């Protein structure tokens, strides 16, 4: 796989963040936080978010995983560091994007460092961070 | 107004170790988890990395609710995520019993620019294969906000 600094990672799109998936996720995670399954609880917060549930942080992170898997294949991710400057809300269309910042060879593996982010068309960057993936040197 | 816990109660959490234990991702669990991410199931029984949130927590013998309680969270709504750091040294697979250890590696009282206090807790978990190889390390950094809601 040919990868160079400045390359753009093909974007991955979640067309509509689904509240039912948040509910399933909450059950699996045993996450008691009502912001993930109770629109009224979110509506009562002084955050101006309206009556929309808030996506779990790991689910937003998983969209970055899906983007990286689609690009370099399952099992390629070595590290993801994710920060959460804004919440992701149910019904939103969000796009995972990234760019290559470094390519290095380490212990007979080619490692690719990237900046990654999750974007919303109006609200801008919702999640941001860095990832490292391993690729086959071409 | 909620009472703010004494700072020494918070800083004393550094070094707290969870009991540790085992966790096995079942096929049904991987199917549901992967579906929640919007992806197709990964090949060969590979577990979607999104499991690196709950697998270490549950496997270490704790829970999100206990982690909230340890930091004396005012409510479930008062927790803010600073970051998640997931290091993967190998793939995770269904039906493998992983051993997990976990601890609080840092606990500090902090203040925002506007003077509002919050407590910053850093949890770290390590996931080992049945052969005792380190498979993954995850670091969760949460802010326990005080009187902001």
Image (cartoon, coloured by chain):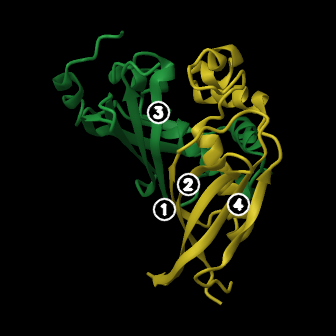
Chain colours: A yellow, B green
Q: Is residue B54 left or right of residue B67?
A: right
Q: Are marks 2 and 1 in contact (CB under 8 Å)?
A: no
Look at mark 3 in the image and give the residue it sits on.
B80
- Reading the image, the residue beneath label 2 is A128
Q: Against A18, is B4 above or below?
A: above
Of tags 1 and 3, the one toward the viewer is 3
Label 4, residues with CA under 10 Å away: few <14, some 14-19, many ≥20 = many
- Sequence-first disc among 1 and 3: 3
Q: CA distance from mark 2 to mark 1?
A: 22 Å
As helix, strand or loop, the secondary structure at mark 1 comes to: loop
User: Position of A18 compared to B143: left or right?
Assistant: right
Label 4 element class: helix
Labels 2 and 3 share a subunit: no
Please identify the residue farthest to the front as the structure is shown: B114
Label 3 is found on which chain of the structure? B
Spatial CA distance of label 2 from label 4 is 14 Å
Asked if badge 4 and badge 3 are on a common chain, one would say no
Pointer 2 or 4: first along the chain: 4
Residue at the extreme left:
B8
For disc 1, the neighbor class at 10 Å (few under 14, some 14 to 19, many from 20) is some
Q: Nearer the viewer, mark 4 or mark 3?
A: 3
For the residues bearing labels 2 and 4, Cβ distance under 8 angstroms: no
- The residue beneath circle 4 is A67
Q: Residue at x 42, y 27 (%)?
A: B62
The CA distance from mark 4 to mark 1 is 19 Å
Nearer to me, B120 or A107: B120
In the rendered image, the quadrant that contains the C terminus of chain A is bottom right
Q: Is residue A23 above or below residue B54?
A: above
User: x%, y% of residue B93?
Assistant: 62, 51
């Amino acid at each position: 796989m040919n990868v160079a600094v400045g390359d753009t990672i093909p974007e991955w799109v979640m067309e509509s963040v689904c509240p039912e998936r948040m509910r399933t996720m909450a059950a699996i995670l045993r996450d008691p936080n009502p912001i993930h399954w109770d629109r009224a609880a979110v509506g009562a917060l002084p955050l101006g978010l309206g009556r929309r549930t808030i996506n779990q942080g790991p689910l937003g992170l998983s969209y970055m995983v899906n983007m990286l898997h689609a690009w370099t294949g399952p099992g390629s991710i070595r590290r993801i560091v994710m920060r959460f400057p804004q919440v992701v809300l149910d019904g939103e269309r969000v796009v995972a994007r990234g760019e290559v910042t470094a390519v290095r060879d380490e212990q007979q593996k080619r490692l690719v460092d990237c900046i990654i982010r999750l974007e919303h068309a109006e609200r801008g960057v919702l999640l941001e961070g860095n990832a490292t993936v391993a690729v086959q040197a071409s | 107004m909620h009472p703010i816990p004494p700072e020494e109660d918070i800083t004393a959490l550094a070094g707290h170790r969870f009991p540790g234990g085992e966790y096995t991702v079942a096929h049904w669990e991987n199917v549901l988890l992967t579906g929640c991410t919007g992806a197709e199931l990964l090949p060969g029984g590979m577990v979607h990395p999104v499991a690196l949130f709950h697998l270490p927590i549950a496997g270490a013998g704790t829970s999100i609710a206990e982690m909230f309680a340890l930091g004396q969270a005012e409510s479930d709504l008062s927790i803010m995520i600073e970051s998640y750091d997931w290091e993967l040294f190998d793939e995770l697979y269904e039906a493998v019993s992983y051993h997990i250890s976990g601890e609080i590696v840092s606990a500090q009282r902090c203040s925002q620019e506007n003077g509002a206090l919050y407590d910053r807790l850093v949890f770290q978990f390590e996931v080992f294969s049945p052969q005792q190889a380190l498979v993954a390390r995850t670091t969760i950094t949460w802010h326990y906000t005080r009187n902001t809601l």
